[in-house]
Amino acid sequence: MKLANTIKCQKCGTAVPEDEVMMTEGKTLCEDCYFDMGHKIRVCDPWGERSKKIFRESHGLTGTEGLTDLQKGIYELIESQGKATRQQLQENFSLSATELENQIAILRHCQLIKGRREEDQVYLVLWE
Ligand SMILES: [Zn+2]
């Protein structure tokens, strides 16, 4: 059995699976530290982060329903290309690294996209 690669959170030292690290201001952080630094997920707040998937299911939302246009755009770009880097998404949607990271976090909580490592790059790919 091969263990997933992990990266150390630069704040608390927790080993974070490589596809779950949050990046901000050039640091790699675990999700908890990321939020501790004040990077709250704003867009999806009414849904509550942990219950997002349940919310979506209970409201019969599937795929990109219930997302903002920006979240849909990110999802659709990844869908059309098969994968995308953070850099590509930032350029394409004119987002700061922090803004993009928030959107990625939301889409990941919704189980729509996830990170995947290929060679030396971490790509964002569709969840399924
Ligand atoms: Zn941490």
Image (tube, helix red, strand yellow):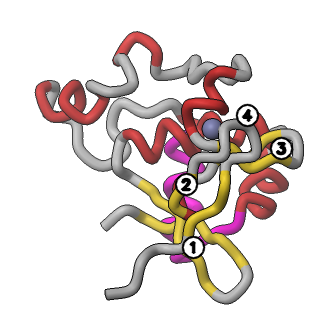
- The residue pinned by badge 2 equals 16
The extreme front residue here reads 13
Q: Nearer the viewer, mark 1 or mark 2?
A: 2
Magenta part, dominant SS: helix
Any mark on residue 94, and which? Answer: 3
Q: Are marks 1 and 4 in contact (CB under 8 Å)?
A: no
Q: Earlier in the sequence, mark 3 or mark 4?
A: 3
Q: Nearer the viewer, mark 4 or mark 2?
A: 2
Q: Earlier in the sequence, mark 4 or mark 2?
A: 2
Q: Earlier in the sequence, mark 2 or mark 3?
A: 2
**Disc 2 beta carbon < 8 A from ligand 1?**
yes
**Total numbered circles:** 4
Q: Nearer the viewer, residue 84 or 29?
A: 29
x and y percentages locating residue 100 in the rendered image: 70, 42
Q: Local crowd at mark 2 within 10 Å, few (<14), some, or many (≥20)?
A: some
Q: Earlier in the sequence, mark 1 or mark 4?
A: 1
Callout 1: SS: loop
Please state, as top left, top right, bottom left or bottom right, where the N terminus lies in the image.
bottom left
The extreme top residue here reads 46
Residue type at mark 3 is Ser
Q: Check if residue 13 falls in the magenta segment.
A: no
- The residue pinned by badge 4 equals 99
- The residue segment tinted magenta is 71-85
Q: Residue at x 74, y 37 (%)?
A: 11
Any mark on residue 83, and which? Answer: 1
